[in-house]
Image (tube, coloured by chain):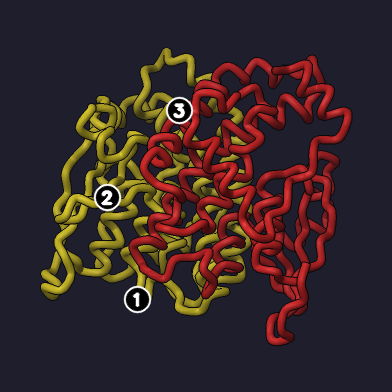
Chain colours: A red, B yellow
Amino acid sequence: MARTPGRRRMITVHGFSPSGNCHKVRLLLEHLGREYRWVETDSSRGETRTPAFLAKNPNGKVPMVELEDGRVLVESNAILCWLADSTPFLPVDAWQRAQALSWMFFEQYSHEPYVAVARFICGWTPHDSPRRTELPRLRERAHEALAVMERHLSSHAWFTGEHYGVADIALFAYTHVAGHGGIPLDGYPAIRDWVTRVQSAPGFVAMPAPDPVARARIDASV
Amino acid sequence: MARTPGRRRMITVHGFSPSGNCHKVRLLLEHLGREYRWVETDSSRGETRTPAFLAKNPNGKVPMVELEDGRVLVESNAILCWLADSTPFLPVDAWQRAQALSWMFFEQYSHEPYVAVARFICGWTPHDSPRRTELPRLRERAHEALAVMERHLSSHAWFTGEHYGVADIALFAYTHVAGHGGIPLDGYPAIRDWVTRVQSAPGFVAMPAPDPVARARIDASV
């Protein structure tokens, strides 16, 4: 984590480290070499539903970026766009920027609710959770989203024009751990190659591995 | 619908008129006075799942914008940002633009999957559809989203800084017809006032009323 010039204010990120949505923010900050403060906020234990947290984000979710003057910004992909503004991670060309946004909305609507939720159920709910009945449908929809990504990556190196950027970071977050939700990437060679490219980018930091309890649940689920 | 200077290329919008996501695009184009061609595409009858459509958008959804050279842009909120670029509907200030994006991601993740899906089930599925068992949960989550909006609108006129903009258009689309899904706005005076402000904006066009079959289903559902 490098220090950056003083004209950029220190930011605080409230995030839950095993969350892909939160890791997106950390990953871009590390790529940019920007200094930041991380406040671990365990949403699985209700820490985003306290009165103090809800006063800052009434929607009760992390990640949340807080500036020194108390202003906040929420929604992982909006945070990525803000951090990436005037950097190579956000295209300057309006059409390419729109395509990056398009993939980011795809991620939040057609990908995350299946890929990330299947992972959450497998690792962070008890073995007898009634939510486990949702898994077959979630996995089916997850594979539909992965097929759309595979098709794009069969003829493009990245999701944002010619360069690694915000759309790649948004889609990488849960795609590379899809296996935790019982959604293997075996049938997606272009996605697997792209995951390797992302992991090779300067400043890349891995998402923390699931804790032993989550790991045991995942191993028993998939 | 005014003609605009020739330097702007003609665009084609593939959309399903009763869809709020599609109406967002029409509404902004009308506010901007931009010329466009509308290709009615009935997603409820599989018209977004034909081989010809899937060749353009593998995710099989409308709205989809198509340029004269065949390039396409999908995802309603990405289309709004692209159309609004360099207009008063998208803030110039990076922080305000990020706040607009934040509300648009909120709309697609925490609002549309409940408010819009409840409306779809009530109006566009048969009375005996098994999906109707989802309605209580969808309505509960819809009210959570509306409460977040009400709180913001209690001290702000708009969702995007000081002006009507893309975030308002994105949130207006399904909020103003939440009643179709059995989600009345009675308890949200600030939202109701904001709906009236949107409807008073220059160039505003109303979303088409549900057809008689959908109307009868809605009346029997709520």
Residue bearing the label numbered 1: B86
**What residue sits 71% from the left and 57% below the top?**
A26
Q: Nearer the viewer, residue B22 or A163?
A: A163
For the N terminus of chain A, the image quarter is bottom right
Q: Tell me the chain of label 3.
A: A
Provide residue B67's location: percent of width, then percent of height.
20, 55
Disc 2, disc 3: CB below 8 Å?
no
Provide residue B86's location: percent of width, then percent of height.
34, 76
Q: Residues within 10 Å of mark 3 (few under 14, many from 20)?
A: some
Is A194 displayed left or right of A173 in the figure?
left
Mark closer to the chain start, 1 or 2: 2
Provide residue A119's location: percent of width, then percent of height.
68, 30
Residue bearing the label numbered 3: A144
Q: Amino acid at mark 1?
A: Ser
Q: Are marks 3 and 1 on the same chain?
A: no
* Separation of residues labelled 1 and 2 (CA atoms): 20 Å
For the C terminus of chain A, the image quarter is top right
- Above or below A222: residue B43: below
Image depth: mark 1 or mark 2 in front: 2
Label 2: element kind: strand
Image depth: mark 3 or mark 1 in front: 3
Label 1: element kind: loop
The circle on residue B72 is 2
Q: Tell me the chain of label 1.
A: B
Q: Are marks 2 and 3 on the same chain?
A: no
Q: Nearer the viewer, residue A129 or A169?
A: A169
